[in-house]
Image (cartoon, coloured by chain):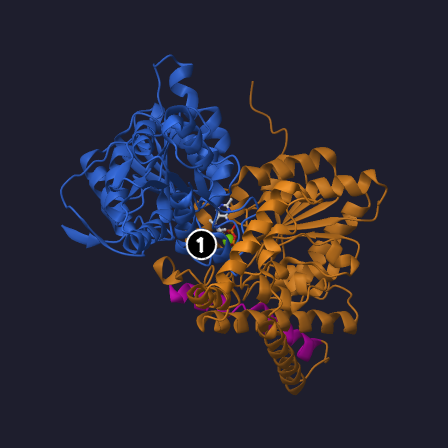
Amino acid sequence: MPLTTIESFSVSYLQVLDENGVLDRALEPELSDADLLRLHRFMEMARDSDQRMLKLQRQGRIGTFPLCTGQEAPSCGAALAMRESDWLVASYRERGARLMRGEPPTQDYLYYNGFEEGAAMAEPLSMRRTTPTQVILAAQTLHAVGIAYAMRLQGEKDTAVVTFLGDGATSQGDFHEALNFAAVWQVPVVFICQNNQWAISHPREKQTRSETIAQKAIAYGMPGLQLDGNDVLACYRATREALDRARSGGGPTLLEAVTYRLLMHTTADDPRKYRSEADEQAWWRKDPLVRFRKYLKEVKGLLTDADIERIQHEISEENKQHVQAFEARKDFKPDASFDFVFGTRHAVIEEQRALFLQDLARRAGAGEDGARTAAREEAAHG
Amino acid sequence: MAKLNMVQAINLALMQEMERDPAVVVLGEDVGVNEGVFRVTAGLHRKYGAERVIDTPLAESAILGTSIGMALGGLRPVAEMQFSGFSYLAIGQLEGNASRMRARTRGLFSCPLVMRMPYGGGVRALEHHSESREATYAHFPGVKVVIPSTPRKARALLVAAIRDPDPVVFMEPKRVYRAFREEVPDEEEVMEIGRADVVREGTALTVVAWGAMLHPTLAAVDRVQAERGVRLEVIDLLTIAPMDVNAVAASVQKTGRCVVVQEAPRSFSVSAEVIAVINDKALMQLEAPVRRVTHYDVPTPYFGREMLYIPDEDRIGRAIEETLDFA
Ligand SMILES: Cc1ncc(C[n+]2csc(CCOP(=O)(O)OP(=O)(O)O)c2C)c(N)n1
Ligand SMILES: [Mg+2]
C-alpha cells in the first residue's frame, strides 16, 4: 500500500519591524504612547546597566556576570505583555524583564558581587511572582509548568506563566519534559527560547538538527512560532497572543526569539576562541535598540534625537546612583548564610552558627589574628 | 620535567592517554573548539579532531549516559562536567547504571569511564560554581572518587583513572588549578587509585585532608611544628572512595591524635567516615577526641562571604593545637 500523509506541519516566522526600521502596519501592535515609552526606557536601562556592570567587572568592582546586550527585546517585550499577576520564571539573561517587573537595579549589583542580599526580592506583586535568576539550565521550565498548574487548580484562571531559556538549554531533558507536561496538562505557560545562536562556544547548528527550535513544539502538541527576537514589537505581539491563548484555556506555546548575544557569554568568556568579529558586526547592524528608537522617532513621532539623549543621560545618572548606593552598603552580617537554611531554626544549624561566630570573635580579639580578620572582612565586603 | 600548574598537568595526562590509547575519547560542553572553560582540554581538539574530542549538545545526563554506552562499546570516555554543580543532572545515570553495570552483569560488562569536574570554592564564582559534594559521590557503591591536591598527583591519578576498569569520579579543586606549579615528569607516571599519600611524617598528631584543603593544612602544620617543636603527620587522602583505611588507621595508631579537614559541609560527610574508620581501627590508641574542621551545613555562601566559611590556616591550626593540648 502506498504511504499516505497523515499529518503535515509548517512553522511561521513573525517580524513586525525589520532591521532597517521598515514596519508592517498590519502587524503593528496597538500600544499606548506611555507603554511604548516605558518599553524604550527599560530597554535603554537594561543596556546601560549591562555596560556599566561590564566596566565595574573590568575594574574588579563586581564579579563574573552574564551579559544581555543585544537581547533586550524578548525580555522587555514579554514583560510589557504580562500582567502584574503573571509569573516570570526566567533564566539569567532577562535583566530587562526583571527591571520592568520592579526588581531594584541594586539587586543585580549585589548578587553579582557575591552577596545574598541581592537575592532578596522586593514587595510588589510582580516580584513576588518572579522566580530567582536561574543558573541550572532549563530547570526553571519545569517550575513554570508546576506554577501554572497550581494557578489553575486554585482558580486563578486569568494568571499565566512566562518562562525563558536559551538555545543551548533546549538540549536538556528538563526542557522536553516541561514541554510535554505543559501540553498534556494544557496549562497556561509561554515558553520563550532566546535563541542567541550560541551556548558559550557551541553554535546553534550543533545544538540541534532541527531547522528551528519553534518546530519542537509540534512534536509535543502545542503551537510554536519563530520570531525576530531583535524586533521588540514582534516580541511583544507574540507573547501577548500566546498569553491571551493561555488565559482562555488554549494551553502552552513555544516561542523562539531569534537574537544574538552581542558580547561575551560571561565576563570570563573570550568569544574570539570560537566566533569571528565579522559575525558579531553583522548582528550589531540588527541592534534591537537602534531599530526601536528609529520607530519611535520616525513612525510614531514620540521622540527626537535630543529626547533620546536626555533619557539616556537620565538613566545613566540613575544607574550611577544605584552603583554608589550598592558600593556604600556595609551592613553585611557574616552569619547571613545560616539565616535561611530551614523555615524554622534548627539546633544543629544554630550550634554551628554559634561556633562560627565564636571563631570570628576570637580572631577579632587575638592581636595578630585581628589583622587577618580585618583583611578577610575587607575581602568579603569587596 | 617541566613545571606545570594543575590545568596543564591534567591536560598532559589527557594528551598522553589519547596518544597511547585510541579508545580514549573526551566529551563535554565546550571542551573542543573552546578548549574547556578552564582550558583543561587545550590542544586536544586540534590534535585529535572532533570525533575523539566531542563538543556535545548541552545535557549532562546525556553526556554521562552516552559515556556509559561508549564504555560498553569498547571506548574509554573521559566526560567533563563543566562544573560539579551541574553534575547532579548526571547522577541518575551514574548511580542507576554506571555504578552497578559490573555487578548487574556478574562481570560481563563494566563501565570504564571518568567523570571529570572542577569543584570547590575560593575563586569568587557565581552560585552553583563553588560546592564540594564529594560525599555524595562517595556514597555510591561501585563508584571510585578521586581528588588530587597538586599538579603532579593530578596528572598521575588521572592517568590511573582513565585506565581504571571502573567508573571514576575525578574531582579537580579549581582553586588549585592555577595556584602554583610543580615539577611534572614528561614520561609516564601513574599513581595507584585507593592509596593515600603521607605527605609529612610525624608522631604527635595526624591531620587528614584532601583537595584544596591540603594547602592551608600544610601551612598550619608548618606553623605549629615550628612553634611547638613537634612533628605532625599529614595524610593526603587522594582517593575518597574506596578509602585507604589502613593508611589512616596506621597513622592514628601511631600518633593517637587526629584532626580531619574538609571543605564540604559538616554533617554526613567524608570527615565523618574518617572518624568512623578511626573508631573501628584505632580507638584504643586515641588520646584525644578526633576534631574536624569543616564548612557548615548551610547552602554555599556567595563569594562575598565564602572565605569566612571555608576552613583556613587559622582554624585548622587552632584545631591542631587544641587536639595536641587535650590531656
Ligand atoms: C545544567 C547546566 N549545565 C551547564 C551549565 C554551564 N553553562 C552556563 S551557561 C551555558 C550555555 C547556555 O547556553 P544557552 O542555553 O544557549 O543560553 P545563553 O547563555 O546563550 O543565554 C553553560 C554550558 C549550567 N549553567 N547549567
Ligand atoms: Mg544561547
Identify the amino acid type marked 1: Ile
Q: Magenta part mainly helix, strand or loop?
A: helix
**Magenta span contains residue B164:** no
Q: Residue at x 57, y 46 (%)?
A: A352
Q: Is the residue marked 1 within 8 Å of ligand 1, measured from its CB?
A: yes
Question: Which residue appears at 62% of the width and 67% of the height?
Answer: A331
**Side of B81 relative to B181 (left or right):** right
Residue occupied by mark 1: A200
Q: Which chain is orange?
A: A
The one of B315 and A308 positioned closer to us in this rendering: B315
- Residue A286 x %, y %: 53, 67
Depicted B284 relative to depicted A212: above or below: above
Q: Is residue A102 above or below residue B270?
A: below
Tell me where residue B5 appears, x and y as whole percent: 26, 53
Q: Which chain is blue?
A: B
Magenta highlight range: A276-299
